[in-house]
């Protein structure tokens, strides 16, 4: 976006196009963070993962826009994290999509599911029949 050949900026000096791109990325960021978060981790650890994902997204966004500076990274992070939290609390968590994604990708759930699965005997395996419990 330009106005008379100049880039339009917010009052903090962060380009509006960067803030818009960061906000757009923030919409899907909770789902990306859900892939990394685990049920076995503490709430604090999962929160740090979400913040780290937002920081990385802000750095990548500012670098991709060719506007890499500390001020732009801070503005991008603010927009990304704010929109990500709004969509997390307003859409992804209430619909159950983010918690389901986190649970399905959790290594703890896989271990529990594997432990619950009954072992088949050699006879059951050969014949395909399952013995009654």
Image (cartoon, rainbow, N blue to C red):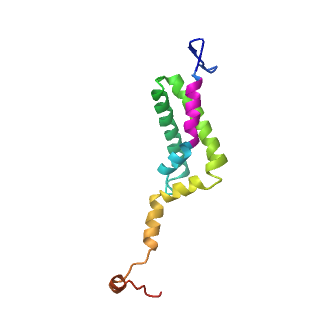
- Looking at the picture, how far across and down is residue 90, in whole percent? 67, 46
Left or right of residue 10, residue 125 in this image: left
- Looking at the picture, how far across and down is residue 60, in whole percent? 46, 32
How many labels, in total?
A: 0
Q: Which of 50 and 27 is in front in this view?
A: 27
Q: Is residue 72 magenta?
A: no
Q: Residue at the spot x=59%, y=30% of the render? A: 20
- Looking at the picture, how far across and down is residue 96, in whole percent? 61, 56
Residue 1 to residue 88: above or below: above
Residue 4 to residue 14: above or below: above
Q: Residue at the spot x=47%, y=31% of the render? A: 59
Q: Which image quarter holds the N terminus? A: top right
- Looking at the picture, how far across and down is residue 13, in whole percent? 59, 19
Q: Which of 27 and 43 is in front in this view?
A: 27
Q: Residue at the spot x=48%, y=22% of the render? A: 67
Q: In which quarter of the image is residue 18?
A: top right
Q: What stretch is highlighted in magenta?
A: 16-27
Q: Nearer the viewer, residue 55 or 31?
A: 31
Q: Is the magenta stretch mostly helix, strand or loop?
A: helix
Q: Which of 65 and 54 is in front in this view?
A: 65
Left or right of residue 100, residue 56 in this image: left
Q: Residue at the spot x=64%, y=54% of the render? A: 95
Q: Quadrant of residue 17?
A: top right
Q: Is residue 20 magenta?
A: yes
């Amino acid at each position: 976006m330009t106005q008379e050949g100049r880039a339009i900026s917010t009052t903090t000096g962060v380009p509006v196009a960067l803030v818009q791109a960061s906000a757009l990325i923030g919409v899907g960021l909770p789902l990306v963070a859900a892939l990394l978060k685990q049920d076995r981790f503490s709430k604090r650890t999962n929160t740090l993962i979400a913040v780290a994902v937002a920081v990385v997204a802000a750095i990548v966004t500012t670098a991709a826009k060719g506007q890499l500076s500390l001020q732009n990274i801070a503005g991008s992070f603010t927009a990304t994290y704010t929109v990500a939290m709004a969509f997390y609390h307003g859409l992804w968590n209430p619909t159950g999509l983010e918690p389901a994604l986190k649970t399905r990708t959790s290594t703890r759930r896989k271990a529990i599911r594997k432990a619950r699965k009954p072992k088949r005997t050699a006879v059951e395996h050969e014949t395909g029949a399952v013995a009654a419990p």
